[in-house]
Image (cartoon, grey):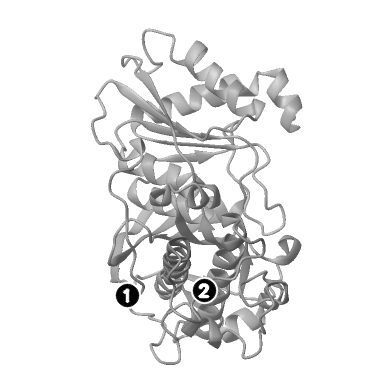
Amino acid sequence: MSKSSKKEVDLTELLSTCVDACRRGCEVIRNVRHKSLEDDGGGPSPGQRVQYKVAGDARSALTEADGASQRVIVDCLTVAWPAEIDAGLIRVVGEEDDEGSTDLDIEKCDTGTSDDTGESSEGGASGYYERYRSPRPDVEPIRRDIFGPVPGAVATEDDEVIIFIDPMDGTREFVEGRIHNVQCLIGITVNGLPVGGAVGIMLVHERQIEVLYGLVSHTGDSCRSVLSGSEVFDAINPLAVPRDDVPDASRQDDGEDELLVFSGDSKKPALGIALRHLEKRVLSRKSLDGGGPCPRMRHMVTGGCGNKFYNVQRRRTAAMSIGPPGSCSWDTAAPAAVLLAADPDARVTDLFGRPLVYDGVRLMNGCGVLVSSGAAANEVHARLAEELRGDEELCELVGFCR
């Protein structure tokens, strides 16, 4: 918090606490993953067995992982910013909130110690740190000093600051074993724009947790990178990471004339319409509007909203991601900020080319998500959005008024 005014929030300090909270939430996910593997082997140590809502159903353990991770993250942020959260200077919106409430009540999170699992929730969040072997903030204080001060990187009481939390992005990926795609997302928005993000990659390294971070400033339609990089933490919870099933999306052999297009395998009509326009109308021409050659499309199916952003970021020469309606603010706030910090010219819009909404009320990205990085990809992005604005079927499908 700024020394000059109690009604200011230093955004570098806020991002630092989000990065630290993110890695502590990542420890929870690693712990649940480790215990679930022990359960499968039939040999967990006494008192360490994971509680399942439905016996033998891996999906029921995810409620524990999601809820417990969010409980830890929210507790860390509340410890770090008690006055600001209490005064409404900082709002927190989490995926696991009851009925999507923006007035976050961590007692309502459906977690591994909620009434539904038959365990007591007495003792507040403190029991979660021991149960999931995540560092307690009263023993290891939340770090506010990961980054040095940046002049002008502050929000005031006149700004609307919202932290969006997705404690475990990629639920299906976790269940079906594609754990490399799972992430922990904490995004910061100011006045409806993504400015900061912490993206935890917790199931890739056996002994480490990596947290990507980004901080940007917005002036009109332009964006400027303030901070961009990653922090690597030694993990407390052990994890055996399979190396023989790395997703194809991790390949680095992209050709210079290729446009990598990432999407999920959703059967939603909006995705099919967008891909059809991209292949048949946008990329079927010999050249782009700017005069460059039209790239060849390589469509890659991968899961996790944050993971798609990450793959676009890793291949900034020419990469896109297309998502149908269904994702929410907590899925896109953090990875959007991290991507923009790495590439301020990247574009993140809905399918029609409009900015995504981050007001803490309209939480669903009802018109889908379109992401691009690289000059050629950005040009394709603009052309595709124009095509989709003229598609009557898609407009009617999502309720877009031209």
Q: Position of residue 268 (x, y in %)?
A: 65, 30
Sequence-earlier tag: 1 or 2: 2
Please give the label number shown on residue 214: none
The answer to whether residue 324 is visible is yes
Using the rendered view, name the quadrant where residue 60 is placed: bottom right
Residue type at mark 1 is: Ile
Residue type at mark 2 is: Arg
Task: Kindly identify the residue that appears in the image at 48 percent across and 77 percent down.
Answer: 48
Q: Position of residue 68 (x, y in %)?
A: 56, 72
The residue to which callout 1 is attached is: 146
Task: Kindly identify the residue that appears in the image at 49 percent across and 27 percent down.
Answer: 382
The residue to which callout 2 is attached is: 49
The answer to whether residue 6 is visible is no
**Would residue 168 be found to the left or right of residue 199 on screen?**
right
Dot 2 alpha-carbon crowd within 10 angstroms: few under 14, some 14 to 19, many 20 or more: some
Q: Nearer the viewer, mark 1 or mark 2?
A: 2
Cα distance, mark 1 to mark 2?
35 Å
**Would residue 253 be found to the left or right of residue 171 on screen?**
left
Q: How many marks?
A: 2
- Extreme-front residue of the structure: 42
Judge whether 193 appears above or below 69 on screen.
Answer: above
Pick the front one: 29 or 304: 29
In terms of secondary structure, where does tag 2 sit?
loop
Pick the front one: 212 or 289: 212
Judge whether 135 appears above or below 348 on screen.
Answer: below
Judge whether 261 appears above or below 124 on screen.
Answer: above
Q: Position of residue 198 (x, y in %)?
A: 42, 62
